[in-house]
Image (cartoon, rainbow, N blue to C red):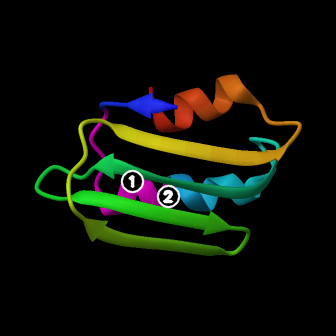
Amino acid sequence: METGRKFTKEELSHALEALGSGEYGQILRAKGIVDGGEEWIYFDYVPGEPDLRTGLPMVTGRLCVIGCDLKEDALYHLFLG
């Protein structure tokens, strides 16, 4: 997915924690970069181990979610809407 949405670290942390709920399918891994306002936030997620850090800006936010039985509409709303 690509997104122009801005996240706070708290919002992104909450979204990554939500991936483990089962509500979005069986998430095996997620990674990406999103606009954090003053800085860009890079993230990596494997179940139970979210990792957030800041880095150099990109043109647009991008993220990838890998898993089984993904609920794409729910993931769209979690990260884009």
User: Crowdedness of circle 1 by 10 Å Cα count: few (<14), some, many (20+)?
Assistant: some
Image: magenta residue range: 5-14
Q: Could you tell me how many numbered marks the image carries?
A: 2
User: Crowdedness of circle 2 by 10 Å Cα count: few (<14), some, many (20+)?
Assistant: few
* Residue at the outermost right position: 69
Instruction: Give amino acid for label 1.
Output: Glu
Q: Which residue is mark 1?
A: 11
Query: Magenta region's main secondary structure?
Result: helix
Question: Element under label 1?
Answer: helix
Question: Element under label 2?
Answer: helix
Identity of the residue drawn at 54% across and 37% down:
78
Left or right: where 26 falls relative to 11:
right
Q: Decide: is 50 above or below 60.
A: below
Left or right: where 47 falls relative to 36:
right
Left or right: where 65 falls relative to 38:
right
Residue 71, picture quadrant = top right
CB-based contact (under 8 Å), mark 1 and mark 2: yes
Left or right: where 33 falls relative to 19:
left
Verify whether residue 10 appears in magenta: yes
Q: Which residue is mark 2?
A: 14
Q: Decide: is 53 above or below 15.
A: below
Residue 64 in picture, x, y percent from top left: 59, 44
Residue 30 in picture, x, y percent from top left: 62, 55
User: What quarter of the picture does the C terminus occupy?
Assistant: top left
Q: Decide: is 21 above or below 50.
A: above
Identity of the residue drawn at 80% across and 36% down:
70
Residue 18 in picture, x, y percent from top left: 63, 54
